[in-house]
Amino acid sequence: MTRFMTLKRVKKMIKIKQINIYQFGRFTGRSIQLPAAPFLIVYGPNEAGKSTLTAFIKYMLFGFPPKAKLDAFVRNRDINGVGGSLHIESETFGGLKLERFLNESGMPKVYDNTGSDNGSHQLNQLFYGLDLPAFEAIFCFDLDGLKELEKIGAKEMNQLLFSAGMTGNSRIMRLEQMLDKKLQALFKPSGRKPVINQTITELDHLKGQLKDWDKKLNDYHDINEKIQQAEREIADILEKKREIENTYHQLAQFSSLKPLMIKYNSLHEEEKQLPDINFPDQGIERLEKWQAQIVVLEGEKAEISKRIEQISLAVRQLNIDRKWLDNERNLLHLINKAPYCESLRQNIDMTKEKILYEANLLDNLINKLGGGWTKEAVCAADIGIESKDHLKQLLNEREKAMHHRDRLEQALSDSMAKTERFQEQIAQSKQYVLDEAERSRIEEQLEASKNRDMLEKEKSWLEAKIQSIHRERRQKSQLKKLSIIIPGSCLVLSVFIAFLQFYSHHPISGFISGAFGVILSLGAKLAIQKTADKTSGESDETEADQRLKTINEILLARPQGELYEYQTLLNKDEEARASIASANQRLEDEKKYYGHLIQQLDNVSLSIETNTERLREWMVRHSFLETPVSLIEEVYQYVEEAKTHVIQQQQLEKQLNGHKQKIDAFEREKYQLAEQLQAENDSLWHLEQRLNKEKEKHQRYLQFKHQLQGLIEQEEALNEKMSRYQTECERLFKAAQVNDEEAFRKKAKKYERKKQIQSEMLEVKRQMEQIEPNRASLQQCHLWLREDRFKGVTKESLKKQIEELEQRLETCRKQSLKWQSERSQLEENQSYAQLKHQMEAKRSFLNEKARQWAVYQTARGLLNKAKEEYRERKLPAVLAQASEYFSKMTGYRYRAILMSDEEGLVAENYAGQSFYVKELSRGTQEQLYVSIRLALASVFESAESFPIIIDDSFVNFDNDRSGQAMAVLSEVSKRHQVILMTCHKEYKNQSDAAWISLADVEHQNIDSVMNEKGVVSCMI
Amino acid sequence: MDRPFSGVGQCPPQLAERFEESTFTALERVIQKAVMERVDFIIFAGDIYDQSHRSLRAQKRFAKNMSLLKEHGIDVYIIHGNHDFLDNNNHLLTLPDNVHVFGPTVSMMPFEKQGRPRVHLYGFSYPERHVHDDMSAHFHKVDGADFHIGILHGSVQGNKQHEVYAPFTVKSLIEKDFDYWALGHIHKRQTLSEEPPIHYPGNIQGLNIKESGDKGALLVELDRHKTEVSFFKTADIIWIDETVSIVNCPSIDRLIDRIETLKESIRREEGVLARVTFAGQGPLHHLLYEEAMIEEMLEALRDGEDEIENFVWLMFFQLKTKPEWDREQLMSSPYFTGDLLRLSCRETSIKPMISDLFSHRRAKKYLDRLNKDEEAGILREAETLLIDALYDLEKGEEND
């Protein structure tokens, strides 16, 4: 659904009410108030300012154009004061004053009826997106447009229609421009500079490079083949070179070995001449070495023998007594034991003192025990664990019994005190007890007061009962009436039914029905009567009345205060009685308890006496002398202590005897040892001194013995060595197969010569081996010497051959390296990969930009399509409207205007003939043009219809045509304010148009205009 | 191997270099894992190279890595797929003898361990670019091994997301009674069956934004009783597609803060190539359609990223923000914007409108074909552009 105007829809209308020109073109300080009529003709001869006025209205509405276009309207290029205002009437916004001045950047000021500035917001809403170009294209025209009429084709028409149907046309234009700009910046089908075109060029370039690489990759196999061939050739050359180099090395080796080999051969010949000699290796040196050793050993042996003799003499002079050394152990034992014996002696004295001390303690204890107690009695007394335990048990029993007796005596005393207290309490309580007569009187009074509550309740009940009796009485009278009506009705009905059945030949059932009816009526009568009888009678009511009177009298008779005092006395009496009863009971209980305590006390005294007897028995049984029971525990302790001292004394005496025996044994042993050693003095100190001396001598003997042993061993070793050296010398002679030293030395000389030849041969051989370490090669050289292999071969000739081969090798290697480099470049070079990656990156960039372009292009396409659609949909409406106007304007000679894509506009007359624009007369062309413009203005979609301003467009119209055109304009003015600028006075007769002459306003003074509230209007 | 990334656009040289190396780095990680885990063999289920990007460097690097595996006694079983089909002209380098390449017909290769065949591997290489037949019918189990593994480069019948190559059904593979099926061709990791295990490991390095997330290979341990399949990461560059809401975002600075926060949240050990999609409705909607603003934001957000190892590089922004106007409401508007939207809805294809460029003789060689979704996106963006430009005016009008 598009927003499409139909002419049938009546729109609101925007009207220009007043034009105030402060300064514009030829006008200064002019104010024109336009009449209310929608069709206005503004008359002015040529140069009267019609076009200026038209321009002023346009610029006031939509803003000033660029200054270049304003030159005709600005005097002396002074823009100060250029501008003015328009008063507009809008049905939506009411009266608005629109003011613009060029020196204020042409920004509009919009005032509403209240004079407040509303900015341009209302203006925007009112103009609905219409701008100056669109206004000029649709609502404002002159005959200049006619010149282009022939050229109006589909595109131009489309633009016009689009303007006529679009809001915010200029914004769409700007959007189109923006899109075109962006599209062109991105891509032009045959451009170079836009981004996409550039990227495509770069991609083509990259692709070309990649193609080159692809070619190179195709050559990869060939390069591989070439490299393999070159490698094979290199291998051949190397093989040959290796052979020649080998020969060269052999020759060089042979040349250096040749003199040595000749020398070796001559030595070998000499060596063969000498016989084989058996001679020990380094025989002479070894013989001389052994002989020198034997001389040295003989000197050492003589010295050792002398030393042995000296030591043997010193040993003999020592004179050691062996019995002292043999008895060393016994003597040392005695010496070690001596301090112990000394301590025993000291101990004997101390023990004697202790025995004496113990005897004193025992005597003291016996004295404490007194009586018949002696040391023997103490020893006889039994103080074993069993007796002690028995005694403890008896004493514990006794103590418990005594303690129990004390507690019983205390309880007896407490019980007597309690008995006295209870008796006192009973005496006190008896004061509050009432005598029986008084008590009975008070109880009666209180009983009567209890009935008062009951009487109150009874009174209420009796009142309710009396009311109930009255109600029952009423019901009873009703029941009495029913007891007659219901049974009677039943009886009559049953008799009637019985007759009916009887006469309808059912006598039995009639009889039964009759009988049933009689029984039913009797039953009903009885039941109702019984119910009536059940209700209370009049006697009940009388009783109730009397009782109610009695109760009221009782309740009025007795006062309330007296009853309270009675109650208090009675309560006290009952409390006193209860207290006495309780005290009597407790007194009785206490007396019983006292008797029970006396009984227990007797039992305890008896058990104490029994215990005393058992203690006495214990003393006899355990040999304790007769003792008072109270002291028995203390006596037992003294006896126990005394017995400990007796035992201690006995042990000390035993210890004293032991010490004495040990000392005697020690003295005996010392004496015997002294005798055995034949010592002059038997004191231990002397014995020890002598023993030490003997031990010292023995020590020295041992040292000498050790030295002697060492010397003997050395002497034996020397003998052995000398013997071995002698044997070695003889072994050398034997090895040389001689018997003496002289023969040995002669044979040695011969042997040396042969050795020298062999050494020289060895040296020559070593030199040869240094030159050629490989034995096989050396043998080869000997062979070559024998064969004279290198006869005629020189190092120079071989060198030359090698150089030639090296040159060939170099060439091949260079070639191979070149190919390998090429291959390696192909394998390793990243250019190809980088190109690929660059290509992909570039392609991504292209796609991204292409997408952007596609968005803009699609937006552009959508806009174009929208415009095209407008043309397709609106053109018929415009042409229809234009046809209607055209038909009227031409006096119905023509009936339609058509549009041809190829030829533009076509007019069709009522005869059905078609004419292109160029085929029409000038006047008809003008009519056609005006019709089209008016039709466009009619279909323009806006909230309110804009004024149509026509400037001298009917110049070529004759009177008829003018009349017809005026009629059309008059019709158009029903929807638009139409302002027709003309220089034709005759239009003044146009009946429904208001007439304004510019001449009348031309001489208005600016001062007067400005006098009153800014602008003074001038009514024509 | 060595296939360029798509959709990255212009970027600093050091990043470009890292991207170029990424496929090799991923392969090296596969090899390192294989050596570390002491695997018996590796299977490459096709498309090791892309023949449209004939890279000798890739083959050389591949051969070098295969030699490394040989040093560690690891065998390699290869089939060629639709991108590296058997064609002597394109396979220029010789691979070491631990690499076993399947021929153009389905055959069996035994893998021996401790002197006896332990695994029978079955597969074939693409003899040409297209194989439209169901090749699974030619796989036949040969007795005499402990395990049987099928290697197949192709897609499941009826998969409309990818071009059909050697189509097969999961049922047909299961019926073969193999112990494992190693599949190739689909770049996304997928499990077609757990028992028996049938897996696409996906590619080892994502190459465009559609291949986002972790990429790697599968480590398979076959046992008499069970099969354990575990994934390990290999990609050096991770593609990530994220969305940032412009809701309640009052300024571009705040939006940049949000993206910075997002950047840090997606930063990881590897380098990240991120595409950020703006979504939601907010006051910044209009600003985001300004190219200069987008360029400025990208510049700010990319600053310094090219200098760090674990970079997060924002490739570009995708706009899916909602304008302030309600499309459905405008659709029923009697004004020009309503006409435009209705017109846009009637458009079945934008191809005629954009044919100047997309059918341009030179340009079309490099341009990707637009699919329907992309066309719809462009159309939607175009209408947003128009409505945004015209909306203010009509809004005032409507308020009347």
Image (cartoon, rainbow, N blue to C red):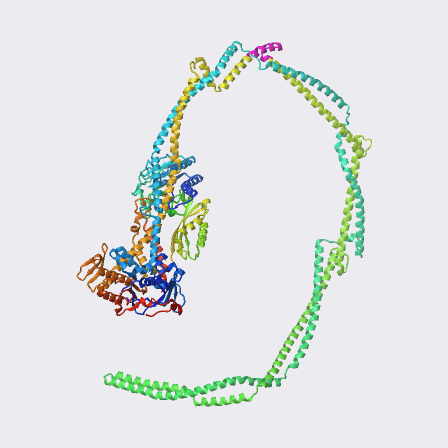
- Magenta span has A743? yes
Asked if A118 appears above or below A235 in the picture, the reply is below
Asked if B187 appears above or below A794 in the picture, the reply is below
Asked if B307 appears above or below A723 in the picture, the reply is below
| Rendered location of residue A1013, percent (x, y) | 40, 69
| Rendered location of residue B89, percent (x, y) | 33, 36
Asked if A442 appears above or below A965 in the picture, the reply is below
Count of numbered circles in the view: 0
- Magenta span has A175? no
Left or right of A755 on screen, residue A611: right
| Rendered location of residue A32, percent (x, y) | 34, 67
Query: Would residue A355 be seen by someone viewing this image from the given angle?
Result: yes
Q: What residue is drawn where x is 77% and y is 58%?
A: A626
Q: Which residues are magenta?
A: A733-754
The one of B398 and B244 positioned closer to us in this rendering: B398
Query: Would residue B220 be seen by someone viewing this image from the given angle?
Result: no
| Rendered location of residue B208, percent (x, y) | 38, 46
Q: Quadrant of the C terminus of chain A?
A: bottom left
Left or right of B298 on screen, residue A15: left
The one of A785 and A410 positioned closer to us in this rendering: A785
Q: Quadrant of the N terminus of chain A?
A: bottom left
State the residue lying farthest toward the right.
Answer: A680
The one of A608 and A222 positioned closer to us in this rendering: A222
Secondary structure character of the magenta stretch overall: helix
The one of A4 and A881 positioned closer to us in this rendering: A881
